[in-house]
Amino acid sequence: MSEEARRIARATLPEGLRPETLAVRTALAPSQHGENSEALFLTSAYVQPDAETSAQRFANSEDFTYSRTSNPTVRSLEARLAAMEGTEAAIATSTGMSAILLLGMGVLKAGDHVICSRSVFGSTINLFAKEFAKFGVETTFVSQTDLADWRAAIKPTTKLFFAETPTNPLTEVCDIRALADLAHDAGAVLAVDNTYSTPALQRPTEMGADIVMHSATKYMDGQGRVMAGALCGSSKWIRDVFGPILRTVGMTLAPFNAWVVLKGLETLSLRMKAQSEQALAVALWLQAQPEIDQVYYPSLASHPQHDLAMRQQSGQGGAVLSFDLRADTPEAARAAAFHVIDSTRVLSIATNLGDTKSIITHPATTSHGRLTEVQRQAAGIGQGLIRLSVGLEHVDDITDDLLRGLSTLTTR
């Protein structure tokens, strides 16, 4: 067997491998040097052997010509993510929000209608409600969990259902299969933001979703290092629809960022399991604290969609939870939330999530701060709400850190 044949064979995996193995092994063939860790290709252009070959390669979108259109490191990430999601293909973008922008540019045109959960990430609401509206796209925001609300919003022009499950920050869970059936009956496409659960816990296309969106900035990286996004789906959507748009508009993922996420995917399943277990322990502890009015976490039996979440998310709740503080007024709630957050000494005060470091934030003034008060209230985002992305510190150190603020509130 030639050296080239050996390289290609090493990249051709047997059928039936489990997701954990695909997360470690799926990639392009190694170079002639036989590197065991995928290589980082930091190049903007690729030298062509002659003009005729150059012409042929520029005519074929699968060949490497210019890194705005294709790069071996990015291609390896896309192959690995598609394998983990169980889709035919994936396309990487510069951020999670750029992935949603690419989704809209590929699916929608002026006069089309979108139905979107009102509980999604604040920037997602603004993208649909403000930016897409500039180009004649109408969006109706509905209850995340009320299927009748989705059904009632359908119009002849409805082309896209968009859901995030669980949602940020209230961890509301939608029935993916039911939404897929409803969307398809209406002649629309269902896209699911799978950032919170990742394919380690949930694979939306197995429940009927057409397109899966990710902010790979979160758990796929896993250590808060880089920005990245992705769409996963059929070859028809990814290569025929989204690919040409990305090549034109340039929301391309940088090779270095792709390499970091590629490495993060190798430990994704282990991290999601460990951090989900940590989050459940913290959620149970929070439920017992007198200053807490409500804890939002899918693994808790008190969660309204607990049974559905356990079926869809492989029996795990994920690593993000939120909780409301007891308070008589919005002003008092905000002051209490700020006090708890500012009293921490271990947790990071930041707006990201998915890090191995636990992160605490106040959604009403950060992730949902640019929404109107009416939009925040519709989404259930109160001034006393705190979101916690649980990392890998010792659970007792996390709860001790929260107790610094809770124990010194005037309500105790």
Image (cartoon, rainbow, N blue to C red):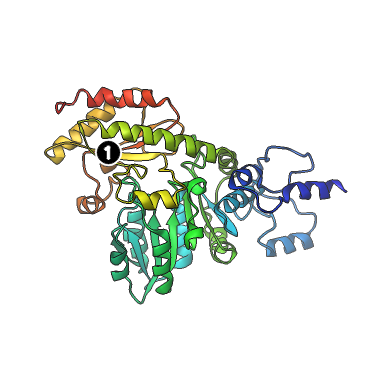
Amino acid at the residue labelled 1: Phe
Where is residue 196 shown, x and y percent of the image? 43, 46
- Towards the viewer: 118 or 14: 14
For residue 390, say whether it is visible.
no
Residue 411 located left or right of residue 278: left
State whether residue 376 is above or below residue 328: below
Regarding mark 1 in the picture, which secondary structure is present there? Answer: strand
In this view, which residue lies farthest toward the bottom? Answer: 156
Where is residue 85 shown, x and y percent of the image? 55, 53
| Quadrant of the rendered image containing residue 113 | bottom left
Residue 258 located left or right of residue 208: right
Which residue is at 36% across, 26% downward?
398
- Towards the viewer: 278 or 65: 278
| Quadrant of the rendered image containing residue 256 | top right
Q: Which residue is mark 1?
A: 323
Where is residue 143 shown, x and y percent of the image? 28, 59
Q: Counting other residues with Cα less than 10 Å from the Cα at mark 1, is it few (<14), some (14-19), or many (20 or more)?
A: many
Which residue is at 76% across, 54% downward?
48
In this view, which residue lies farthest toward the left? Answer: 328
Where is residue 57 shown, x and y percent of the image? 72, 60
- Towards the viewer: 215 or 389: 389
Residue 90 located left or right of residue 359: right
Residue 184 located left or right of residue 14: left
For residue 339, say whether it is visible.
yes
State whether residue 21 is above or below residue 60: above
Which residue is at 28% across, 65% downward?
149
The quarter of the rendered structure image containing the C terminus is top left
State whether residue 351 is above or below residue 245: above
- Towards the viewer: 93 or 210: 210
